Image: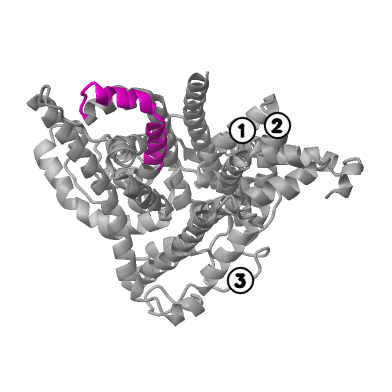
Amino acid sequence: MTTVQTGIQPISTSRRVKDRIVHVLVYLAFAIAVIPLVSVLWLVIKNGMHRFDLEFLTHSMRNIGARDAGGGAYHAIIGTLEQVSLASLIAVPIGLLTAVYLVEYGSGGRLARSISFFVDVMTGVPSVVSGLFVLAFWILALGMPFSGFAGAMALSILMMPVVVRSAEEMLRLVPNDLREASYALGVPKWRTIVKVVLPTAFTGIVTGVMLAVARVAGETAPLLLTVFFTDSINNDPFNGPQMGLPLYVFDQAGRPTDTAIDRAWTGALTLILIVMLLNLVARLIAWWRSPAKRGS
Amino acid sequence: MRRSAFRRSRGDVPFRFASTGAGIVLLGIMAAIGVFLIVRAVPALQANTSHFLTEKTWNPNAVEPVFGIGALAFGTVLSSFLALVIAMPVAIGVALFISHYAPRRLAAILGYVIDLLAAVPSVVYGLWGVVFLVPFMRGPSEFLNTYFGWIPLFGGDQVVGKSMLTASIVLAIMILPIIAAISREVFLQAPKMQEEAALALGATRWEMIRMAVLPFGRPGVISAAMLGLGRAMGETIAVALILPATFGISFQILGPNGNSIAANIANGFGEATDTGRGALIASGLVLFLITLVVNMGARLVIARRKEFTRA
């Protein structure tokens, strides 16, 4: 890519200066973009380590006032894990089947095109709107209580488009030769999909799902409207308010005492660790993926 | 596997049915979002004693509810546009850096670093914003106010850290990765032949980018900007923690004013009455419609470009 200078005619100074200026600006832009990342991670680690202890991981906030030290996020961690798993249980089958429809059955028809378009549009649905929807539909219209499951539904709406998009991309990468070979052996289409296409794309799909999970694990707004708050441990995601880790951070950050802010930082550290871990695992799976491996 | 070749494919019909059904469920959810928001918003809107679209105050919990979207919609649009203005140049620079400037071997890793920005949960940005950025911004804000106060945007008598500007900077950080990622993709797709032709004719790297890469990438960059705008508008928690939650319309982005639809939902939900919840849902409906329009616009731009490049 370097400009090779032949001896014919040197590049004029103004052109060279302009080129250098842009060069510097582009490097500068990257540096500017990295500054907030470093700053956020540094502060979260520095302030979060302060309370990152066993008590934090094993205790709830029951009977702990805003000014008290101590207390933990056990109830929030449990809540987040349950809500995110439930959300995945809803979103992954629907998302995967939709992707199968788009790639294997839809073949550019009108329905497939409109589904594809609205999946894209769905990616842009604000998280707070998905929370409002579950609030309006599940809690206000059907009269259900605030619960972890309601939160899971809101999260699943945010997950679905991500799962569809990534799975669709992976399914399209499966070479057509494999499908045709399977058909030639007389294998029906659905068995071809289940036994040949999906296993081939398996690792890629897992990566996509993990990234989707990582995305929704940090969502706060939908939980605020559907899971509500609690300071106690509630292991049952179908009954009564729960807590979620993002919600915990939001709650503690809103309290004006140092002990609460400390807890908020530690909650943020825990949340980032979970999200980064999911991201890392997803990338590693993608890294190891090779066409030679069958995957399943 | 072999034996099934002789059977009629009994499983085919249900499987096809299930996958088509899943797709239709997705469409159904999108429709249901609109329908249920409307259904729950209508009673509150009927109880409203003022005009929803023009009223600036937000008091739906009173006996005679008075609320309107005016100030909130203004705050949403202003903060998102500011965020876009801040994020765009940096995002394009980052995209160019990764697609055309960074050493090949490093590019993938550096791209991943930028993607990490998107992996940080919004509530963490909110916490960072409140504890670190708000106090930090007081100095620069005062500087802007003193020396550039003649620009209406930076004017005003009061300068605070919890301002529209701070919120917009946090929003800009949050939408930067998505804009950078999409722009990077389109820049990478720019025709190699044209790039090499430009270089062969003696163009500098910048001239090559200006002639071969930027014109090709323009529609992609525009739609990336719109997607970023949509995301900024819907962003809730970080903004809710930073903005001072006042109701008024002011262009003075350094002063103690500003609010957004999403932030108001997060802040107001706890103590909302029945009508209050309906009012919040009504405001959510407005947000949904605005982001829908922005996103659909972005997607149409992308779709048109796809047809164009494939033809």
**First-in-chain label (1 vs 3):** 1
Q: Nearer the viewer, mark 2 or mark 3?
A: 2
Q: Which residue is identified by label 3?
A: A234
What residue sits 84% from the left and 39% below the top?
Answer: B13
Q: Nearer the viewer, residue B67 or A186?
A: A186
What residue sits 22% from the left and 57% below the top?
Answer: B135
* Percent of width and height locating residue B61: 50, 47
Question: In this orientation, does residue A147 appear?
Answer: no
Would residue A88 be counted in the magenta stretch? no
| Image: magenta residue range | B178-204
Tell me if label 1 and label 3 are in contact, CB under 8 Å. Answer: no
Element marked by disc 2: helix
- Side (left or right) of A187 relative to B170: right
Which circle marks residue A116 in the picture?
A: 1
What residue sits 38% from the left and 43% below the top?
Answer: B175
Element marked by disc 1: helix
* Percent of width and height locating residue A170: 59, 44
Q: CA distance from mark 2 to mark 1?
A: 10 Å
Tell me if label 2 and label 1 are in contact, CB under 8 Å. Answer: yes
Q: Chain of mark 1?
A: A
- Side (left or right) of A15 relative to A185: left
Identified by mark 2, the residue type is Gly
**First-in-chain label (2 vs 3):** 2
Q: Chain of mark 3?
A: A
* Percent of width and height locating residue A238: 68, 63
Q: Which residue is identified by label 2?
A: A106
